[in-house]
Amino acid sequence: MSLEVSVVMPCLNEARTVGTCVQKALNSLRELKIEGEVLVADNGSTDGSQTIAREAGARVVTIPRKGYGAAYLGGIPAAQGKFIVIGDSDDTYDFTDLERFITPLRQGYDFVIGNRLKGKIEKGAMPWLNRYIGNPFLSGFLNLLFKTGVGDAHCGMRSFTRQAFFRMQLRTMGMEFASEMVVKASQAGLKIKEIPSTLHRSKFSRTPHLRPIPDGWRHLRFMLIYSPTHLFIFPGIFLLTIGFILLLALLGGPLKIGTHAFDYHFMVLGSLLSILGFQVINLGIYAKAYSIYEKLIPEDSFLKGFYRWFTLEKGIYGGLLLVGIGMTIMFYLLAKYIWGHLVFELRLAIFSMTLIVLGVQIIFSSFLLSLMTTSPKPDIVDFQPEE
């Protein structure tokens, strides 16, 4: 690329501020003697933002699909710079501060993100709910799941190399794009630097594009969907473990703890939790295999280890073993009933039924899992026949 830096701004009806943002960025580039450009990714403005941005010196690209992520996914590939700096066009981020976001990239970092919590948030710049509850919770939850080490995952002022952008393979269209970029940067092994930044109060009263509850849910939904281990497998293991503890503890008779007695009802609960837990684990393995195949998440050691151990035949044999044990117990109970032993052993019946259901699940799940692979989905190559 002939340009070193492209400053990319999403825009949706920001006529009062987009011109100022463009001018600040261009002035900053000139002062730093950087060959660069400002690109405005317009998301369908109806207030003349496009004209104002062009008159201020920006290049404008029109992004028909609505959404914060859609604007960036359409605008960033059109940028011509080796380094990309992004920030909102509502004049809440300081585009005179470009040097701190460019210098780390020159030093070898791939991704730089601001941290408003370690920098400065002007009074009234961020709603109380977002500042003290929403952002800390979502950033903390993101780090719990993905170990990114980023303290303010939703700061909109960022920079990265053009190569890093394509390595991240971003695809979300809404506000969750901010979370996805941090997660994908970490998963791609990019060298990340976080720097303190300032969030300014908007100089004009405006309806914010960010909707705290719906957009907060979009971020949370993204994180859960992109972490099948935490969404499915860990809860499934917990349910399966509790279920089998109840089944085995009560198999020999009622269990009395203090003044409380645990009997058949808790065996039924144990059976339910065991079956439910196993099914949730299955869903987690399906989700991980599919996500890796579609290149939504990187390969991990859990699924690699599972597929090294798992074969269709092992699954069938294991399922048949459980079904066989369960059916043997059932036939034993039936024989006792036929031969005149009228006392039906409900505990054994609950236990054997659970084994049969789990065994059948294992057998059919094994066929589905055998269709899945940890290998990434192959890229389609258009081979031309030799003449």
Image (spheres, rainbow, N blue to C red):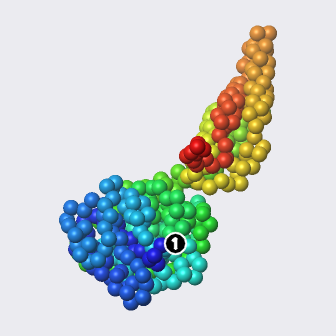
Other residues around mark 1 within 10 Å, as few (<14) / some (14–19) / many (≥20)? many
What residue lies at 35% left-to-right and 80% top-to-bottom?
25
Image coordinates of residue 363 in percent, x first then y, are 70, 30
Q: Is residue 219 above or below residue 277?
A: below
The residue sitting at 65% across, 36% down in the picture is 371
Q: Amino acid at mark 1?
A: Thr
Q: Quadrant of the C terminus?
A: top right
Q: Position of residue 264 (x, y in %)?
A: 66, 31
Please tell me which residue lies in front, 318 or 354: 318
**Nearer to the camera, 299 or 198:** 299
- In-image side of 78 versus 202 (left or right): right
- Kindly identify which residue carries mark 1: 161
Q: Quadrant of residue 79?
A: bottom left
Whether residue 190 is visible, yes or no, is yes
The relative height of residue 38 versus residue 254 in the rendered view (above or below) is: below
> What SS does tag 1 mark?
strand
Residue 147 placement, left or right of 206: right
Kindly indicate the quadrant of the structure image that contains residue 310. Answer: top right
Q: Quadrant of residue 326?
A: top right
- Relative to 226, say whether 195 is above or below: below
**Residue with the most extreme left position:** 47
The answer to whether 153 appears left or right of 236 in the picture is left
